[in-house]
Image (cartoon, rainbow, N blue to C red):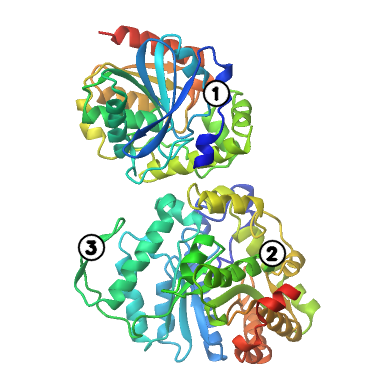
Amino acid sequence: LTELFAAEDTVGKRRTAPVKQSTIEVRGCRLNVRRAGKGEPLLFLHGAQGLNGREPGLEALTESCDVIAPDHPGFGRSADSELIDDAGDLAFFYLDLLNVMEIDRVHLVGQCIGGWVALEMAVRTTERIASLVLVNSAGIRVKGVPRADMFVCSQDELMKMLFAGQGADEWLASWRATPDMEDIYDRNRAAAAKYSWSPRLFNPKLERWLHRVDVPTHIIWGEDDRVIPPAYATALKGLIAGATVTMLPSSAHLPHIEQPQAFASEVARFIRSAAR
Amino acid sequence: MPYAHLDMTYTQKHRAAWVVLPNTYFDPKKGHELYNRYLDELELVAETGFDGISVNEHHQNAYGLMPSPVVMAAALSRRTKNAKIAILGNAFCLREHPLTLAEEHAMIDCITGGRLISGMVRGIGAEYYSLGVNPTISHARFQEAHDLVVQAWTRPGPFAFEGKHYHFEYVNVWPRPYQQPHPPIWAPSTGSTETIEWAAHPSRKYVYLQAYSPIVSVARYLNYYRECAQRMYGYTASSDQIGWSTPVYVSDTDQKARDEAKAHIEVLFNKLLRLPFEMIFPPGYLSMKSLKNMRSHKRSVSGQEHTVDTLIEQGIMVCGSPDTVRKQFMDTHRTLGFQNLLCLMQFGTLPRDLTEKNIRLFAREVLPALQGLTDKEYGGMEVRAAE
């Protein structure tokens, strides 16, 4: 993995806020963490596609928040960890990360698998969690609602699942920019499969403990998502006391990429309202 | 063991003959006839002097109707007397309880008085969609399932098995296998370096069987086994550790063989082996290193339209008159050294009469010459280098 860590990240240079990229060791796992912006700490937990440094929704959030965006273990430029097999392990791992970083209060924003991890953290303890934003989140299964499979499909089909509009070509091009990025794309697919293959994208036991989520929770959903359809937003709202929902039009699975301004302003508005 | 009655226009509606092809395409009445026909053909193979007959496992597809090769092996156990019955293989690691297969293999070994060859495979990528097992841990589970099964066959029970993926309080398999310490284990594969290195290990020295590949790939992987043995483990692999599996068709002349095999072998490769990249290699099924290798060597078995001519040219199939086929196998043995040869005598839509003719002609004209080959006829590294 040394070449991954040594590789130069040139992507940060085009950002408005300077991005600090560092390696933080948690439980023996070297975690690659991007951090930018000023304000209350916000931990962004990415989804199955990982991060490629071109997430305009996160960039927009740096105007109001101290955005902390790690690559999950096994994704991007983070190391693998033998301690982590599933979303529940990732939850304990990120609670440990908050300890290591000495963050007492954090806004959690999780998309897809990241939303699932955020929920797993919150049912364990909300001691340090100020608020929770779930974006097209995995974690539960709504019976009878068919979902499109991100793994079995061709790349063309996948792009149609992830994007409602025309953003796929540009996004895909950013993954094809260098051989290093191409490797990370493959690595991310494998890591996503490791954590979410079976049962696909959910933990059957999670739903029965969601009453423990006792922090302000907002649900943001790209309404054209077929990977995790909008019925899941409704179901999560019913399972988490006081949760609110905003549906984002013209967006599918990746609202932080496809509708960055709407995504960021929704998150920022909610975090302001949730501030103590 | 293909579903030969498949409506081949399925390709207009479905992207694969695996995983997503609706099972409404399968007619159980035609299935009944096919199963019995294929069993007849396998029994004929045993009667005509082949050393063994082989069955294998694939799930939820039209390519092969054997989700459980154990069922077929059991059916053959009592209908054959001398032939080895080779299950090549069973995917023990696809099971939550690999011991059920360990029991079944031991039963067949006892019933046949030690005629079982036990192949262990990971299963191809499609299996991981069909059975829901996580592909990212398949190597680890494969190796652990193997350890569990070998211990179950060899260690006095009951004992507890304490693995990462498998945990059992009582491992105490009844019956124990007839062959001691256990039936021969083979490792069939389409060319995973991890599997080759594992099979060649001195504690195992399992027969590595390369299946469905252009002859350049067969050569690369079989030689890699020998190189592993020499360089990683410091011993010289013998030809009886090496195997090759390929479709074979013989007829009176080269041209006649080509003409007779053409439609049927093309269906096999273009219709029944229709598997998109994402299906054959789900994420994490291959290590990053193997994935890059695979991408750069662009596999030529699936993903391209084949004709009987391209299949013969690339050495994916062996087809011709008895003289041609005999010579090709003997020459290849001289350069690659394989003492185990698996001939796929029925393929695609090849009908009963041509299959039987193929079996009988091969048994009479080709087989005797090959059965006499040993390590002595293998030319070794020097011959390979010179050529």
Relative to the observer, which residue lies in front, B387 or B183? Answer: B387
Q: Residues within 10 Å of mark 2 (few under 14, many from 20)?
A: many
Q: Is residue A129 visible?
A: yes
Element class at badge 1 = loop
Left/right of residue B226 with respect to residue A193 in the rendered view: right
Name the quadrant containing residue B140: bottom left
The chain carrying label 2 is: B
The relative height of residue A182 versus residue A225 in the rendered view (above or below) is below
| Image quadrant containing the N terminus of chain B | bottom right
Relative image position of residue B270 (x, y in whole percent): 66, 59
Q: Is residue B360 above or below residue A228?
A: below
Q: SS of the residue at dot 2? A: helix
| Residue ID for mark 1 | A54
Q: Residues within 10 Å of mark 1 (few under 14, many from 20)?
A: some
**Residue lying at 31% horizontally and 56% vertically, measured from the top left:** B165
Chain of the residue where label 3 is placed in the rendered structure:
B
Camera sees residue A131: no
Instruction: Give the mark toward the camera: 1 or 2.
Output: 1
Residue bearing the label numbered 3: B168
Q: Tell me how far mark 1 sits from mark 3, CA to CA.
A: 47 Å
Q: Residue at x 60, y 71 (%)?
A: B222
- Counting other residues with Cα less than 10 Å from the Cα at mark 3, is it few (<14), some (14-19), or many (20 or more)? few
